[in-house]
Amino acid sequence: MGVEAYHYSCVIMFYLFLITFIVPHAKGEHFIVGDSYGWIDIFDFNNWCDGKEFHVGDVLVFKYESSLHNVLQVDSTVYENCIKDSYIQRFTSGNDSIILEEGGAWFMCGVDDHCENGQKLHINVTP
Ligand SMILES: *[C@@H]1O[C@H](CO)[C@@H](O)[C@H](O)[C@H]1NC(C)=O
Ligand SMILES: [Cu+2]
């Protein structure tokens, strides 16, 4: 193998390494909230969270009928009390991707009494 070919194969190895190890970590894991049920008002989201680990850079995807629900990112007090007009961020597309940051994250639906009925989600995001 000539020097040129050897050099070329090193470059390829380097990119294979990047694709295999670096890129998947950079993109983070995607979690569809509620899996195939999606973000609905008759579901146990605490149960859905059990056994899952969320890390910084992972993505929560909320899928729902946009005329029936929304997603409010809130603080823990608002979450506990299901307050609808005191959110940090509001999402309404029906297909909302939220990149996770370190610490607690609280989400609830702001439509009717969905939050009171359990359409709320609390997760802890680790580094
Ligand atoms: C939902 O959003 C993701 C990421 O933005 C996109 O890749 C996907 O195609 C969207 N799905 C639908 C059904 O719109
Ligand atoms: Cu709702």
Image (cartoon, rainbow, N blue to C red):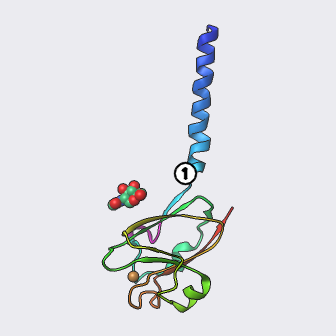
Residue at the left extreme?
A: 67
Q: Amino acid at mark 1?
A: Lys
Label 1 beta carbon within 8 A of ligand 1 = no
**Residue for badge 1:** 27
- Count of marks placed on residues: 1
Count neighbours of disc 1 (C-alpha within 10 A) and say few if under 14, some if 14 to 19, many if 20 or more: few
At x 57%, y 44%, the residue is 23
Q: Position of residue 78 (x, y in %)?
A: 56, 87
Q: Position of residue 113 (x, y in %)?
A: 41, 91
Whether 101 is among the magenta residues is no
* Quadrant holding the N terminus: top right
At x 40%, y 77%, the residue is 70
- Which is more toward the observer, 16 or 104? 104
Above or below, 76 relative to 30 = below
Q: Position of residue 65 (x, y in %)?
A: 32, 74
At x 56%, y 38%, the residue is 19
* Quadrant holding the C terminus: bottom right
Bounds of the magenta segment: 32-36
- Which is more toward the observer, 97 or 35? 97
- Relative to residue 33, is residue 27 drawn left or right? right
- Which is more toward the observer, 56 or 74? 74
Q: Quadrant of ligand 2?
A: bottom left
The picture quadrant where one finds residue 15 is: top right
At x 63%, y 61%, the residue is 56
Circle 1: element type: helix
Residue at the top extreme?
A: 2
Q: Position of residue 120 (x, y in %)?
A: 50, 81
Above or below, 36 relative to 122 = above
